[in-house]
Image (cartoon, rainbow, N blue to C red):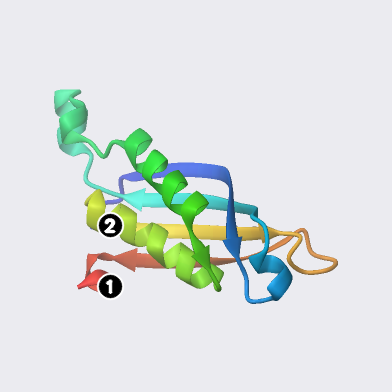
Amino acid sequence: MQTDQIQIHDLLLRCIVGINPEERVKKQDVIVNLTLYADMRQAGHSDNIDDAVNYKTLTKRVIDHVEQSEYFLVEKLAHTIAEIAVVEFGVQRAIVSLEKPGALRFARSVGVVIDRTAADFE
């Protein structure tokens, strides 16, 4: 597998996520980090966006999805973000880190990290 990576750090987004009634009322902050694996050799040779993963378009798609979503679990939200990257944008592998700041008392945040490939969405 290629080791070329696109890294997107600290997307601060707002959505409905959580199982408690108070979490279902108004949007709360989530922080998303993405590590996307793709073969970037052709883009490196051609200098043409058509040969690359358009991370600006991908990021806009993730933002739209997250801000319109209402999930009970951060695991589900992270999984759907990975699915967008792998299925819609053709990356080979997506590692998604998703945090909910202030979700646990005495902790800055709580979160999950998931790792998905195309085989996970067949």
| Tag 1: amino acid | Asp
Label 2 crowd (10 A; few <14 / some 14-19 / many >=20): many
Please state if 23 lies on the left or on the right of 119 as rendered.
right
Q: Which mark is residue 86?
A: 2
Please state if 32 lies on the left or on the right of 81 as rendered.
right
Residue 38 visible somewhere in the drawing: yes
Residue 55 locus on image (x, y percent)? 35, 38
The N terminus: image quadrant? bottom left
- CA separation, marks 1 and 2? 9 Å
Instruction: Name the foreground residue: 95 vs 63.
Output: 63
Disc with the residue nearer the chain's start (1 vs 2) = 2
Question: In the figure, 108 relative to 112: above or below?
Answer: above
Residue 84 locus on image (x, y percent)? 32, 55
| Tag 2: amino acid | Val
Instruction: Name the foreground residue: 84 vs 95.
Output: 84
Residue found farthest to the top: 47
Query: Residue drawn 28% across and 72% down?
Result: 120
Residue 81 locus on image (x, y percent)? 40, 58
Question: In the figure, 40 relative to 26: above or below?
Answer: above
Hey, which quadrant is residue 17 in on the image? bottom right
Element type at mark 1: helix
The C terminus: image quadrant? bottom left
Please state if 82 lies on the left or on the right of 106 as rendered.
left
Q: Residue 120 carries which label?
A: 1
Query: Residue drawn 48% across and 64% down?
Result: 77
Residue 114 locus on image (x, y percent)? 45, 67
Element type at mark 2: helix
Mark 1 and mark 2 in contact? Answer it, CB < 8 Å. yes
